[in-house]
Image (cartoon, coloured by chain):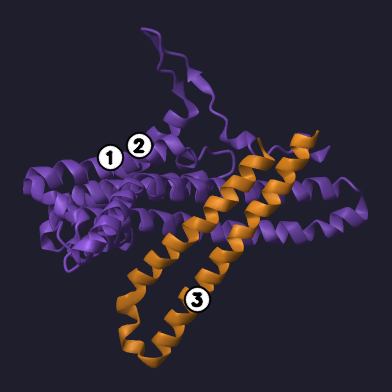
Chain colours: A purple, B orange
Amino acid sequence: MAADKVDPIHQFHIIKLVPINIGGYDLSFTNSALFMVATVVVAAAFLFLTTSSRSLVPGRLQSISEMAYEFVANMLRDAAGTQGMKFFPLVFSLFMFVLVANLLGLFPYFFTVTSHIIVTFGLAILVIGTVIVYGFMKHGLGFLKLFVPKGVPLVMMVLVVPIEVISFVSRPISLSVRLFANMLAGHITLKVFSGFVVSLSALGAVGVAGSILPLAMAVALTALELLVAFLQAYVFAVLTCMYLNDALHPSH
Amino acid sequence: MEVNAAAAIGAGIACLGMGGAGIGLGNIFGSYLSGALRNPSAADGQFGRLIFGFAVTEALGIFSLLIALLLVFK
């Protein structure tokens, strides 16, 4: 009965805000699109406003922007070397987009953009597409050395090469499903525990007293989700750096 | 009705996979901690690899949780 009232999936429903239909294609402006725009605006406005003063001794907000910059720059330099720095705009944009989208989604009644597989899959395909296109542009057919590890006996190649190919092909899937499933599972868990509070407090005075437990759990889970929101953005960026490293140095 | 019952049982079985991910995560953090206590000066340099291993392992547990959720809220 309570399950009908508190539907944990309801928060992921896409609502058309401005229906647009061009040539039979549904290009409506949805709540998902609204929050993607909000994510970009928040990230861009924060970075622009905090760094526009360009003081030599940074203030509190300017420090945050500089820390984010240094954080991603160090990550990329460690994983892909100084050559990888030409991909810095891509990695930094991806990191900030995923981070701000995850954090915005934590607010009550806000839509979480990254909890939809199509959004994260789009980002992952962008990364893998960059790796493939850049790899073939820079190394030509030498990029295929990625699938042939050095020092492996010829007999083992029959086994190793298909495994390497499968592991490469499954990368966009694992990259996108990791982010999407983490956000989906986290938000469903939050909603389920909040639902316990509602259905317990409907039982009367004893229920209200007992509902403190799931309420405390929901608070603790929100803290955990804050960590997960940052961690998943970090993991997405780190894996992007590692895949870009493959495009720069295919023989391993 | 049998389909719903089978889906509920399947969701429960799918959650077993998270146990494997739990064992793996415990291994990762336990090994990191024992290594870090032996050589604390090298610990910070390996933090990125720790998080990478955590993410790759955790993803497998999340996949089985996703299957369970899809079966429950289908």
Q: CA distance from mark 1 to mark 2?
A: 6 Å
Label 2: state its secondary structure.
Answer: helix
**Residue B32 x, y percent position in the rendering:** 42, 80
- Do callouts 1 and 2 point to residues on the same chain? yes
Residue at image x 39%, y 50%?
A: A99
What chain is tagged by disc 1?
A
Task: Find out whether the residues at labels 1 and 2 contact each other: C-beta distance under 8 Å.
Answer: yes
Residue at the disc numbered 2:
A122
What chain is tagged by disc 2?
A
Q: Which mark is residue B60?
A: none
Label 1: state its secondary structure.
Answer: helix
Q: Specify whether residue A50 is in view.
A: yes
**Residue A178 x, y percent position in the rendering:** 45, 51
Residue at the disc numbered 3:
B27
Residue at the disc numbered 1:
A126
Residue at image x 50%, y 20%?
A: A17
**A187 displayed left or right of A102:** right
Label 3: state its secondary structure.
Answer: helix
Q: Nearer the viewer, mark 2 or mark 3?
A: 3
User: For the residue carrying disc 2, how many other residues have a C-alpha within 10 Å: few (<14), some (14-19), or many (20+)?
Assistant: few
**Residue B17 x, y percent position in the rendering:** 59, 58
- Do callouts 2 and 3 point to residues on the same chain? no
In the depicted structure, whether residue A155 falls above or below residue A107:
below
The N terminus of chain A appears in which quarter of the rendering?
top right
What chain is tagged by disc 3?
B
